[in-house]
C-alpha cells in the first residue's frame, strides 16, 4: 500500500511541476523577443535529449534483465530531472 501511495504522490507532484513549467514557458513565449526564441529552441532540444536518454536507459535496463516496472522507473528519471531543472530556472 505504501508503494502505491508513494507512486501516486510522485505522479501528482510531477504533474504539478509540469503544469508550472508549461505556464512559465507560455509567459516567456508570450513576452516575445530573444528570450522567447531561446526558450523555444531550448524546449525542443531538451525534449529530444530527455527522450533519447530515457530510451537508452530503458533499453539498457531491459537488456540486462531488469523487470519492466523497474526499467520504467529508471526511464522516468531523465524526464523528472529535466522538469525540475526547468522549474528552478524559469522561477529563478
Image (spheres, grey):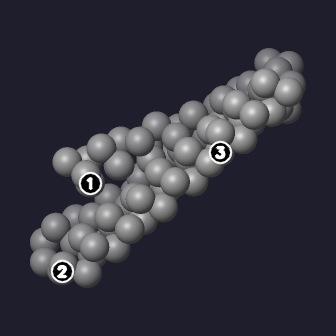
| Front disc: 1 or 2 | 1
Front residue of 55 and 40: 40
Residue at 41% over, 59% down: 20
C-alpha gap between disc 1 and disc 3: 21 Å
Q: Helix, strand or loop at disc 2? A: loop
Q: Position of residue 24 (x, y in %)?
A: 32, 64
Front residue of 75 and 63: 75
Q: Position of residue 68 (x, y in %)?
A: 85, 32
Position of residue 20 relative to residue 68, above or below, is below
| Front disc: 3 or 2 | 3
Quick one: quadrant of the N terminus? top right
C-alpha gap between disc 1 and disc 2: 15 Å
Q: Which mark is residue 90?
A: 1
Other residues around mark 1 within 10 Å, as few (<14) / some (14–19) / many (≥20): some
Residue 83 in sight = yes
- The disc, 3 or 2, on the residue closer to the chain's N-terminal end is 3
- The disc, 1 or 2, on the residue closer to the chain's N-terminal end is 2
Q: Which mark is residue 32?
A: 2
Q: Position of residue 89 (x, y in %)?
A: 26, 47
Residue at 18% over, 80% down: 32
C-alpha gap between disc 3 and disc 2: 32 Å
Front residue of 63 and 9: 9
What is the quadrant of residue 56 in the picture? top right
Residue at 27% over, 64% down: 39
Q: Helix, strand or loop at disc 1? A: helix
Amino acid at each position: 500500500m505504501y508503494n502505491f501511495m508513494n507512486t501516486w504522490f510522485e505522479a501528482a507532484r510531477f504533474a504539478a511541476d509540469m503544469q508550472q513549467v508549461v505556464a512559465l514557458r507560455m509567459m516567456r513565449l508570450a513576452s516575445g523577443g530573444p528570450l522567447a526564441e531561446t526558450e523555444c529552441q531550448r524546449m525542443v532540444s531538451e525534449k529530444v535529449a530527455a527522450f533519447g536518454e530515457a530510451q537508452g536507459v530503458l533499453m539498457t535496463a531491459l537488456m540486462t534483465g531488469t523487470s519492466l516496472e523497474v526499467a520504467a522507473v529508471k526511464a522516468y528519471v531523465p524526464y523528472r530531472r529535466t522538469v525540475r531543472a526547468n522549474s528552478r530556472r524559469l522561477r529563478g
